[in-house]
């Protein structure tokens, strides 16, 4: 589980400061306030680890250093740090370690992007690594085994990288292998789906592997569909669904749903769009392995306000009963209010949640953690958090009084 994250000079963020994460972490705020950029820090590090290219200091995807550095100031350096709890203890130099931290600074120099430094920290030692002759590389998963000029603070120097740092690099890679992302725009429902008998690790960033995951869970005898169907009924969306093959010999499947108990089975394409958008969220929540870290961007998209509220109960169930961390970015007042209610009802504790509000000020993002007490009250509720509801009611009343006066 990620316990802390920090970013410096990344996009609209000059410095996020150390953000404490909990099993259920929520980022709220206006559009373009920097919420998504916080998620992108984790996703960028994940794709860098997955890429495993020793010549690529940081995988920016379709972007580049100039586009992500704060205010496009190439004299600045990017800074990232992340702390996390390990799924199980490891032993490093005789010490049992149950948590790790990683930090790095990245800059552009001589026309190239390079790593200035990176550092591992445990509760016992700091392992800071830099190169004196071979230039700068990046994460320990791409440490050059042939290099012999490492400077290592916290251990004897020089030292071979594999002997001292392999356990750290494995845990770092393991952390980002457990991160699964589901984007705000899920795939439109299809008339048919192809499944080749594979067992996907996730459902894809657009939910495009959802049907494969559902069918795979049946083969592997994972009873996730019991939970999915339970929540679809609780959310008052549909009564049941099935994924039968189109033909006995084929590899094509269709998704059929019943909107009420004795109703006809109809294709998913023929029911409300919200069903196809929430079904990937439910599938991922119960398909992802334990110890996963789910990043959900606008999971409430295209859902009725009541369903948005009830979706909070799904997230609470997952973090409490499945040992899965959820980091979500949301615009939903209804989802937040349900979380506050459940805290008051003691369905989830304050310590199990971390809620933040982001805003933009003269081109620089700012973030504040919402102060929630044990009764679900927020003492630092930001002005116009979800719009000026009271202001709209006042102006509506004024307009009504004016019109009634004119009509008389």
Image (spheres, grey):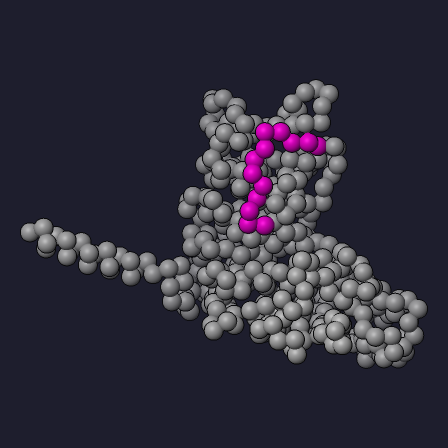
Q: How many dots with numbers? A: 0
Q: Is residue 88 visible?
A: no
Question: Which residue sits at x=71%, y=69%?
Answer: 101
Which quadrant would residue 153 be assigned to in this image? Answer: bottom right
Seen from this angle, which residue lies furthest left?
A: 408
Q: Position of residue 268 (x, y in %)?
A: 54, 31
Q: Position of residue 9 (x, y in %)?
A: 61, 73
Which quadrant would residue 162 be assigned to in this image? Answer: bottom right
Q: Position of residue 163 (x, y in %)?
A: 90, 68
Asked if the magenta segment contains residue 378, the reply would be no
Left or right, 134 with respect to 278, comes to right
Q: Is residue 111 visible?
A: yes
Nearest the eye: 44 or 386: 44
User: Majority secondary structure of the magenta segment?
Assistant: loop
Question: Which residue sits at x=19%, y=56%?
Answer: 399
Q: Position of residue 235 (x, y in %)?
A: 47, 39
Please provide the residue range marked out in magenta: 183-195
Asked if the magenta segment contains residue 186, the reply would be yes
Seen from this angle, which residue lies furthest front?
A: 111
Left or right, 317 with respect to 99, comes to left
Left or right, 348 with respect to 150, comes to left
In the rendered image, which quarter contains the N terminus? Answer: bottom right
Question: Which residue sits at x=72%, y=45%?
Answer: 201
Question: Which residue sits at x=59%, y=29%?
Answer: 191
Which quadrant would residue 51 be assigned to in this image? Answer: bottom right
């Amino acid at each position: 589980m990620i316990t802390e994250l920090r970013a410096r000079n990344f996009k609209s963020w000059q410095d996020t400061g150390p953000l404490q994460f909990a099993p259920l972490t929520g980022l709220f705020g206006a559009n373009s306030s920097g919420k998504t950029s916080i998620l992108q820090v984790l996703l960028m590090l994940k794709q860098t680890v997955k890429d495993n290219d020793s010549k690529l200091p940081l995988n920016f995807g379709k972007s580049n250093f100039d586009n992500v550095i704060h205010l496009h100031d190439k004299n600045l350096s990017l800074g990232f740090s992340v702390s996390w709890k390990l799924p199980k203890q490891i032993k490093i130099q005789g010490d049992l370690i149950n948590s790790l931290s990683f930090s790095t600074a990245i800059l552009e120099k001589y026309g190239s992007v390079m790593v200035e430094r990176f550092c591992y920290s445990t509760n016992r030692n700091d392992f800071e690594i830099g190169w004196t002759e071979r230039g700068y590389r990046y994460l320990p998963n791409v440490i050059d085994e042939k290099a012999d000029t490492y400077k290592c603070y916290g251990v004897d120097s020089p030292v071979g990288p594999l002997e001292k740092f392999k356990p750290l690099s494995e845990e770092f890679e393991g952390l980002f292998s457990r991160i699964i992302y589901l984007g705000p725009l899920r795939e439109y429902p299809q008339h048919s789906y192809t499944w080749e008998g594979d067992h996907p690790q996730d459902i894809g960033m657009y939910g495009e592997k959802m049907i494969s995951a559902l069918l795979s869970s049946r083969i592997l005898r994972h009873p996730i569909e019991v939970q999915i169907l339970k929540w679809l009924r609780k959310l008052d969306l549909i009564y049941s669904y099935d994924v039968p093959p189109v033909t006995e010999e084929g590899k094509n499947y269709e998704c059929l749903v019943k909107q009420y108990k004795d109703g006809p089975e109809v294709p998913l394409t023929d029911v409300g769009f919200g069903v196809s958008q929430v079904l990937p969220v439910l599938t991922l929540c119960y398909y992802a392995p334990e110890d996963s870290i789910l990043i959900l961007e606008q999971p409430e998209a295209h859902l009725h306000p009541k369903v948005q509220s009830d979706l909070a109960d799904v997230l609470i169930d997952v973090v409490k009963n499945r040992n899965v961390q959820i980091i979500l970015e949301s615009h939903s007042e209804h989802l937040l209010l349900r979380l506050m209610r459940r805290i008051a009802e003691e369905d989830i504790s304050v310590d199990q949640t971390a809620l933040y509000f982001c805003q933009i000020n003269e081109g620089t993002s700012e973030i504040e953690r919402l102060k929630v007490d044990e009764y679900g009250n927020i003492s630092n509720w930001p002005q116009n958090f979800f719009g000026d509801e009271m202001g709209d009611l006042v102006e509506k009343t004024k307009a009504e009084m004016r019109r009634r006066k004119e009509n008389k």
